[in-house]
Image (cartoon, rainbow, N blue to C red):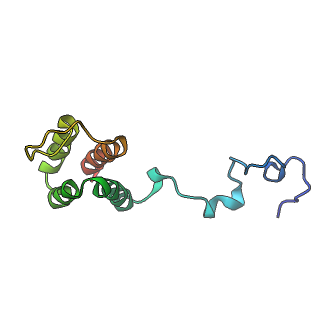
Amino acid sequence: MPDPKDPNDSRFHETGFPSLQWEEDDLPTRPMPLHERPLQARIDNEMAIIAEHHVRIALAIEKFWGHRDCVEYLQKLIMSGGHQDGQRRVGFKSEVLSALINLAAMHKIE
């Protein structure tokens, strides 16, 4: 157990902010970065972002997921800025666009 009076221990400096360094004993309880999460958890996270803004697109992606046409559909969405339902769109919000790009990359991995 570290000594709280040890001046070399960065966790106990009175800066008002927690240390940005993870100590060895903190590693098992640190938050898991997105890139270290299991693939399905990352897919679910991206789908939730899309579903929050575009339910119909999320349902279409779920229907296509696992098929080779899914990446083409995702790429069309990314390039055209919207669903091909006849409505003109200006584009997607940045978080939705990022989620679409991430899903396309993860589909290729799977």
At horizontal 15% and vertical 46% (from top left) the residue drawn is 83
* Left or right position of 74 against 99: left
- From the top left corner, tell me how far across and down residue 3 is, in percent: 88, 59
At horizontal 84% and vertical 49% (from top left) the residue drawn is 14
At horizontal 38% and vertical 56% (from top left) the residue drawn is 42
Q: Is residue 45 above or below residue 72?
A: below
Question: Looking at this view, is 60 or 53 the one in front?
Answer: 53
Image quarter in which the N terminus is found: bottom right
At horizontal 25% and vertical 53% (from top left) the residue drawn is 54
How many numbered circles are shown? 0
Q: Is residue 99 above or below residue 43?
A: above
Q: Which image quadrant is residue 92 in?
A: top left
* Left or right position of 31 against 19: left
Image quarter in which the C terminus is found: bottom left
Question: Looking at this view, is 67 or 24 the one in front?
Answer: 67
Q: Which image quadrant is residue 82 in?
A: top left
